[in-house]
């Protein structure tokens, strides 16, 4: 990474309400990044506990913290939007008030961006600690979110969302701030899934090695740090045959019925979990 790349400003935005008992640890993990230029933006959603006092003290101790107290409750989505609006960095990440970041998180997540200007966000593996102390470590290893085809990306996103619990959590990935800020965040039921869908349709997503890239490419060094497109981008998706015969054949022999065909005769598509009849 060049000196110019090391100096790029990255904003970590923490929306919080009544988080005095857990916020400090999250803030300090964000400040402990090995990337040089960090700002931590905190939007306090009219907290009624000691959150304001804690945040003002933390901001007094470290000038990289930008604290903003809201005079009224903006609700959850409104506070998420507010912390993004207040950020100044070229790159941005939302962070929960009870989350922790590894010290190398930002520096590693920046690398795919520097190798591929198409990317709107970069995801990473996450570890979830449940209330009972047990740990869940989902590992997503797909590459279709890198596709230039928005339908391909949408298909991959919803495959993961519906089959892998926490397999992919894009709203807590590193993002190109200006491009993400241009995508309106809706206020509706299950808005996080709707917003993730909108981001998937906007531009390709990347990931950090080794979990996101093909094992062979990583083993050869192709994905070490900054994956080249030749090694880490998925190849073109094979074109499915038409269902003119009334049955899907070849690699699509176990596919489900076509996703859109009023007459029941359209292209064959791979089946999702549970399989399909294979008939068109």
Image (cartoon, rainbow, N blue to C red):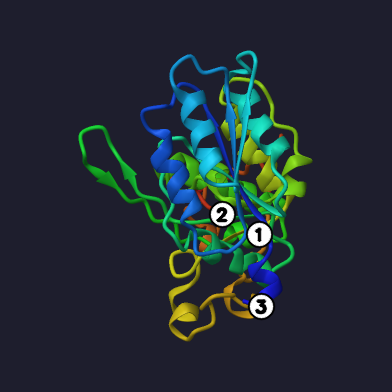
Name which quarter of the figure residue 4 lies in: bottom right
User: Mark 2 and mark 1 in contact (Cβ < 8 Å)?
Assistant: yes
User: Mark 3 and mark 1 in contact (Cβ < 8 Å)?
Assistant: no
**Residue 58: where, in percent of width, then height?**
50, 38
Q: Nearer the viewer, mark 3 or mark 2?
A: 3
Q: Is residue 14 above or below residue 153?
A: above
User: Mark 2 and mark 3 in contact (Cβ < 8 Å)?
Assistant: no
**Residue 164: where, in percent of width, then height?**
41, 45
Q: Quadrant of the C terminus?
A: top right
Please tell me which residue lies in front, 224 or 84: 84
Residue linked to disc 3: 2
**Residue 254: where, in percent of width, then height?**
47, 53
- Marks 1/3: CA distance? 47 Å
Question: Which of the marked residues, 1 or 3, is nearer the chain's N terminus?
Answer: 3
**Residue 64: where, in percent of width, then height?**
60, 48
- Marks 3/2: CA distance? 51 Å
Mark 1 crowdedness (10 Å alpha carbons): few <14, some 14-19, many ≥20: some
Q: Residue 183 has which mark?
A: none
The residue depicted at 75 percent of the width and 33 percent of the height is: 184
Q: Quadrant of the N terminus?
A: bottom right
Question: Which of the marked residues, 3 or 2, is nearer the chain's N terminus?
Answer: 3
Residue linked to disc 1: 241
- Marks 1/2: CA distance? 8 Å
Q: Residue 248 has which mark?
A: 2
The residue depicted at 43 percent of the width and 55 percent of the height is: 125
**Disc 2 secondary structure class:** loop
Please tell me which residue lies in front, 25 or 145: 25
């Amino acid at each position: 990474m060049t000196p110019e790349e090391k100096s790029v400003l990255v904003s970590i935005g923490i929306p919080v309400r009544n988080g005095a008992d857990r916020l400090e640890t999250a803030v300090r993990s964000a400040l402990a990044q090995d990337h040089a230029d960090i700002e931590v933006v905190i939007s306090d959603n009219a907290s009624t506990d000691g959150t304001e006092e804690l945040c003002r003290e933390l901001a007094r101790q470290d000038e990289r913290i930008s604290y903003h107290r809201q005079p009224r409750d903006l609700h959850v989505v409104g506070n998420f939007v507010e912390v993004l609006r207040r950020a100044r960095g070229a790159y941005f990440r939302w962070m929960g008030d009870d989350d922790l970041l590894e010290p190398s998180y930002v520096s590693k997540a920046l690398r795919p961006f520097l190798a591929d200007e198409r990317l709107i966000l970069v995801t990473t593996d996450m570890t979830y600690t449940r209330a009972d102390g047990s740990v869940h470590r989902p590992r997503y290893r797909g590459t279709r979110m890198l596709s230039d085809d928005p339908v391909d990306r949408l298909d991959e996103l919803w495959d993961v969302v519906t089959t892998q619990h926490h397999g992919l959590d894009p709203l807590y990935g590193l993002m190109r701030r200006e491009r993400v800020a241009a995508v309106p965040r809706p206020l509706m039921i299950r808005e996080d899934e709707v917003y993730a869908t909108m981001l998937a349709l906007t531009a390709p997503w990347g990931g950090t090695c080794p979990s996101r890239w093909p094992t062979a490419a990583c083993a050869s060094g192709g994905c070490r740090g900054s994956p080249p497109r030749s090694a880490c981008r998925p190849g073109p998706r094979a074109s499915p045959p038409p269902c003119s015969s009334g049955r899907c054949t070849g690699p699509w022999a176990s596919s489900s019925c076509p996703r859109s065909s009023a007459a029941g005769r359209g292209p064959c598509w791979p089946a999702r979990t549970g399989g399909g009849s294979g008939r068109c």
